Image (tube, rainbow, N blue to C red):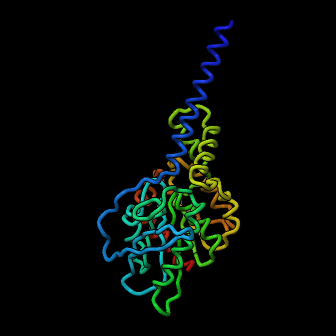
Amino acid sequence: MTWLIVAAGFGAGVLAGLALVVVEFGAWALVTPRRSSDPAPFGSDEAIRAVAADGVALAGRWIPADRPTGRTVILVHGFIDGPGMMILDRAPAVLARGWNVAAIDLRGYGASEGMHSTFGAREADDLRAWLDVLAGLAPPGEPFAPVAWGRSMGAAIALRAAVADRRVRALVLEAPMVDLRSSVAKVMRNKRLPMAPTLSRLVVRRAGKIAGTSLAGPAMADLAARFDRPVVVVHGSNDDLIPSAVARELADSFPAPAPFLEVPGARHADVARVGGAALLGEVMDRLEAAT
């Protein structure tokens, strides 16, 4: 009997140790941005700079419309991509309608300073700093009309910033990250890890301690209920990270339920590419009607 107790204790210790390894690895992976090189310059793009409230230097790319205008789409990338891919898949459609494009490097990505990604805890304020910079780029006499287009994590950041800053005229939320812990749990289940919900909570909590701020943040549905300007939610029918039903619930959480554009066959990272010109044209039609 004694050896059974010893074996059980040893096994429990091994499992606990493995769980700690998973939590620590997952937490660091969650807050460590993946720096990637941008593609070649897009047309007449130029480097732009902003300074966050905590002094972090932020970088981005500015692509003005052919004719001077104050209407600007701010592209906010997700966790695994960068501004370069946002530009390639979306900028041509935006510029064709006579809007400016600003593609920003979130802190820790691209040429921006910063060590940790915080899923909006700090990035929402960073986006407000960008609004100050971009307002200064509007031609004299042209009203500044910014729209934030966020993908995945970028959608959560865009909504959080827009609730706090009424200068944002409208939002495009593409494959929006609705709940970080649920998404982490989904990744863990895909990797066949046991106790995914429990481990995901521990990962997100530990990641917040590493980053020095909570990653939980306000619930997206609660934020949506406070945003009274136009919104378009775009989602892939085969999203393997955030189910369409969850994104649709978010769309319905706004005071005036947001249009929900579901792209057949699209997964989490290829919504704009699969939707193509038809999807991007519809999104721009709605933005022009709203602003």
- Which image quadrant for residue 206? top right
Identify the residue shown where x is 60% and y is 54%.
212
Work out whether 135 lies above or below 230. Answer: below
Residue 69, image x, y percentages: 45, 85
Identify the residue shown where x is 58% and y is 63%.
122
- Which image quadrant for residue 274? bottom left
Residue sticking out furthest to the front: 55
Identify the residue shown where x is 56% and y is 45%.
184
Residue 176, image x, y percentages: 56, 57
Residue 198, image x, y percentages: 65, 38
Residue 165 seen: yes
Residue sticking out furthest to the top: 1
Quadrant in which the C terminus is drawn: bottom right
Residue 235 seen: no
Work out whether 46 lies above or below 243. Answer: below
Residue 121, image x, y percentages: 60, 60
Quadrant in which the N terminus is drawn: top right
Work out whether 171 lies above or below 219. Answer: below
The reply, left or right, for residue 166 in relation to residue 60 is right
